[in-house]
Image (cartoon, rainbow, N blue to C red):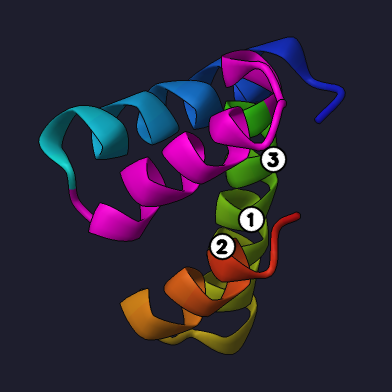
């Protein structure tokens, strides 16, 4: 994520997902990654990359958000 404004907005979305616990997998993934030794920021950036990928797929394929697919991608993070 090279664009600073875009990165800031993506991290804001990740923070909001964690705050409202929707989808639940976002907060669970953050906790899992932090427990594994990553910093909170590193973990949020990794989640943000998955979010960007999901948003790209949604726009490219003109499909709605698929929480199950998003959860699966998050579960593949180390």
Nearer to us of marks 1 and 2 is 2
Secondary element under disc 3, as helix, strand or loop, is: helix
Residue ID for mark 1: 50
Residue 21 horizontal/vertical position (percent): 17, 43
Secondary element under disc 1, as helix, strand or loop, is: helix
Residue ID for mark 3: 46
Q: Main secondary structure of the magenta part?
A: helix
Please state if 72 lies on the left or on the right of 20 as rendered: right
Query: The C terminus is located in which quarter?
Result: bottom right
* Residue appearing at x 63%, y 51% in the figure: 52
Please state if 15 lies on the left or on the right of 57 as rendered: left
Q: Residue furthest right?
A: 2
Contact, mark 1 vs mark 3 (Cβ under 8 Å): yes
Residue 62's disc number: none
Residue 74's disc number: 2
Q: Is residue 31 magenta?
A: yes
């Amino acid at each position: 994520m090279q664009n600073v404004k875009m990165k800031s907005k993506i991290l804001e979305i990740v923070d909001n997902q964690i705050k409202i616990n929707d989808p639940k997998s976002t907060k669970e993934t953050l906790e899992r990654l932090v427990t594994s030794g990553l910093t909170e920021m590193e973990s949020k950036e990794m989640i943000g990359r998955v979010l960007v990928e999901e948003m790209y797929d949604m726009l490219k394929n003109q499909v709605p958000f698929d929480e199950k697919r998003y959860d699966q991608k998050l579960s593949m993070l180390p």
